[in-house]
């Protein structure tokens, strides 16, 4: 399995970068996890949008879905020119918010509602869900190929129950929108220290800090997570690739 960070910024993208977007690949299957602002631009450094096999969304805040519309338009143009695809692109999302209705577009994309209580099969991946603590209905996403596993917390305040969901994951993509001592309980975001606690309690192999803040010294996030988790810690960045 290979995970590529396309965008890692919380709320809005830093200049010339992107907000949330991750490309997960295995056996030639290409899954885009979240599609935030500028993700479509960054995706094209790796593949044609029409070569995606599926998209899955954690929730419908703009920094996670802003580029869905332009992705749909890119596929529409491709259908007139290169004709890469024979079937609509599946975009998986929960149907607990109005955003789901935007996922189906002509015969270009098809919105597919996932049931958070069930395991979703998408290509070689088995995908399961955990409802997070966030103002909008949001789900953490666990993706496994049967051997390797990546867990993406999406947006959430700290919940110890997430450790059970992420137990033993090879890679934990954990939101770290805040610094130690800040209270993210009402905003629905974690500190880097809390991400470290989660990684330790889940006994994951590697922690990747993402959904990064636009203030402070980002290297401090790694230090704060390292106070709680003794394993490898990476700071997400554009084009970071993690193979396992």
Image: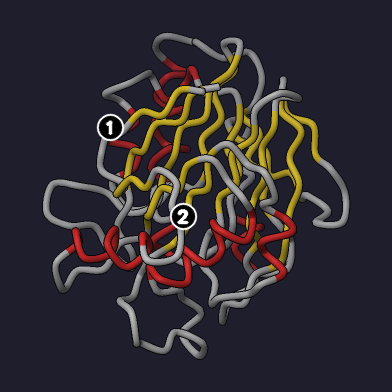
The residue that appears at 33% across and 21% down in the rendered structure is 46
The residue that appears at 64% across and 50% down in the rendered structure is 141
Residue 164 position, x and y percent, is 74, 59
Q: Residues within 10 Å of mark 1 (few under 14, many from 20)?
A: some
Q: Which mark is residue 194?
A: none
Residue 60 position, x and y percent, is 54, 63
Residue where numbered disc 1 is placed: 239
Residue 68 position, x and y percent, is 46, 47
| Residue sitting nearer the eye, 38 or 84 | 38
Give above or below for 55 relative to 233. Answer: above
Q: Quadrant of residue 135?
A: bottom right
Residue 206 position, x and y percent, is 47, 42
Give above or below for 79 relative to 68. Answer: above
Label 2 vs 1, first from the N-terminus: 2
How far is the residue under mark 2 from the one under mark 1?
A: 19 Å
The residue that appears at 40% across and 43% down in the rendered structure is 232
Residue where numbered disc 2 is placed: 65
Give above or below for 94 relative to 133. Answer: above
Q: Residue furthest right?
A: 118
Q: Secondary structure at mark 1?
A: loop
165 on left or right of 219: right
The residue that appears at 67% across and 64% down in the rendered structure is 162
């Amino acid at each position: 399995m290979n995970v590529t960070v396309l965008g890692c910024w919380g709320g809005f993208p830093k200049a010339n970068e992107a907000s949330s977007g991750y490309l997960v690949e295995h056996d030639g299957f290409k899954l885009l996890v979240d599609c935030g602002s500028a993700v479509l631009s960054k995706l094209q450094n790796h593949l044609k949008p029409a070569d995606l096999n599926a998209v899955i969304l954690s929730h419908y805040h703009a920094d996670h879905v802003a580029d869905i519309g332009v992705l749909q338009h890119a596929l529409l143009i491709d259908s007139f020119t290169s004709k890469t695809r024979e079937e609509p692109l599946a975009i998986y999302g929960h149907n607990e918010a109005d955003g789901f209705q935007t996922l189906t577009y002509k015969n270009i994309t098809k919105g597919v509602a996932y049931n958070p209580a069930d395991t979703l099969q998408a290509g070689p991946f088995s995908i399961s869900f955990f409802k997070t603590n966030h103002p909008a209905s949001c789900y953490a996403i666990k993706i496994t190929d049967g051997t390797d596993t990546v867990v993406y917390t999406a947006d959430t305040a700290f919940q110890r129950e997430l450790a059970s969901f992420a137990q033993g994951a090879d890679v934990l993509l954990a939101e770290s929108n805040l610094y130690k001592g800040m209270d993210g309980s009402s905003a629905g975001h974690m500190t880097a220290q809390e991400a470290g606690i989660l990684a330790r309690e889940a006994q994951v192999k590697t922690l990747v800090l993402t959904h990064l803040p636009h203030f402070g010294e980002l290297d401090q996030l790694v230090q704060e997570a390292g106070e709680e988790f003794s394993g490898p810690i990476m700071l997400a960045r554009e084009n970071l690739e993690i193979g396992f």
